Amino acid sequence: MCGAGKAGSWAVAALLALGFWQLGQGAYIPAKAWLAQELMQRAWLRVTAGEDRAAPWPWADTWPVARLTSKTRDVDLIVLAGDSGRTLAFGPGHLGASATPGDTGNAIIAGHRDTHFAFLRDVEPGERLGVETIAGASYVYEIVDTAIVDSRTGSLALDTDLSMLTLVTCYPFDALEPGGPLRYVVTARQVP
């Protein structure tokens, strides 16, 4: 009987250890995203004070290029240069081939659906987004459309006659598997 009790204790301990490991794995990505935004906020202050390409941490190959805010959704995010997977792991990234926010054309910013761009699930046309550039200029964009696009057949316009902002993330928001071809696209037009 003593052996069965000991085996049961080991089984319970193993299940508890597995449960804590799973909790840690689930908390890792959001914790990493939060810490990265804190470090990027500090880099943002250095960039806006005049430091060129202030890296948020010593080994970073990206730097802050803009600040994206939504008062409605209580969002304040530092946008990084580039759209590589490594960059997007830490924050939203500005696609270098797209326009700079505030300029004529379409400024495209991508982010992960389960961290920084999770708020896009709830945005609606008419809501406003703020963008501040490293030069200190501030712009307001009004959301005009949300759409689900198949990345295999759809494309995003880069050249427009207006100053546009497009936010892109993977879809569906609650998918169990990462990636997939569908994208959630939020389009906003600069408000004069």
Image: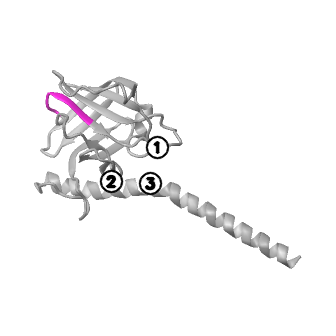
Mark 3–mark 2 distance (CA, rounded to whole Å): 12 Å
Q: Residue 78: x percent and y percent?
A: 27, 48
Residue neighbourhood size for the residue with mark 3, other residues' Cα within 10 Å, grouped as few (<14), some (14–19), many (≥20):
some
Observer-nearest of 39 and 172: 172
- Name the front one of labels 1 and 2: 1
How many dots with numbers?
Answer: 3
The three-letter amino acid code for the residue at tag 1 is Pro
Residue neighbourhood size for the residue with mark 1, other residues' Cα within 10 Å, grouped as few (<14), some (14–19), many (≥20):
few
Looking at the rendered structure, which numbered label has been put on residue 29?
Answer: 3
The residue tagged 1 is: 178
SS at circle 3? helix
Q: Is residue 105 above or below residue 76?
A: above
Which residue, as the protein is rendered here, is positioned at the far right? 1
SS at circle 2? helix
The segment highlighted magenta reads 102-108
SS at circle 1? loop
Position of residue 56 in the picture relative to residue 150 (left or right): left
The three-letter amino acid code for the residue at tag 2 is Gln
Location of the N terminus (image quadrant): bottom right
Which residue is at 20% across, 55% downward? Answer: 45
Q: Quadrant of residue 57?
A: bottom left
Which residue is at 40% across, 30% downward? Answer: 123
Q: Quadrant of residue 93?
A: top left
Position of residue 16 in the picture relative to residue 162 (left or right): right
Q: Is residue 105 above or below residue 17?
A: above
Q: Residue 169: x percent and y percent?
A: 38, 37
Looking at the rendered structure, which numbered label has been put on residue 37?
Answer: 2
In contact (CB < 8 Å): disc 1 and disc 3: no
Looking at the rendered structure, which numbered label has been put on residue 80?
Answer: none
Q: Is residue 45 above or below residue 115?
A: below
Position of residue 131 in the picture relative to residue 30 (left or right): left
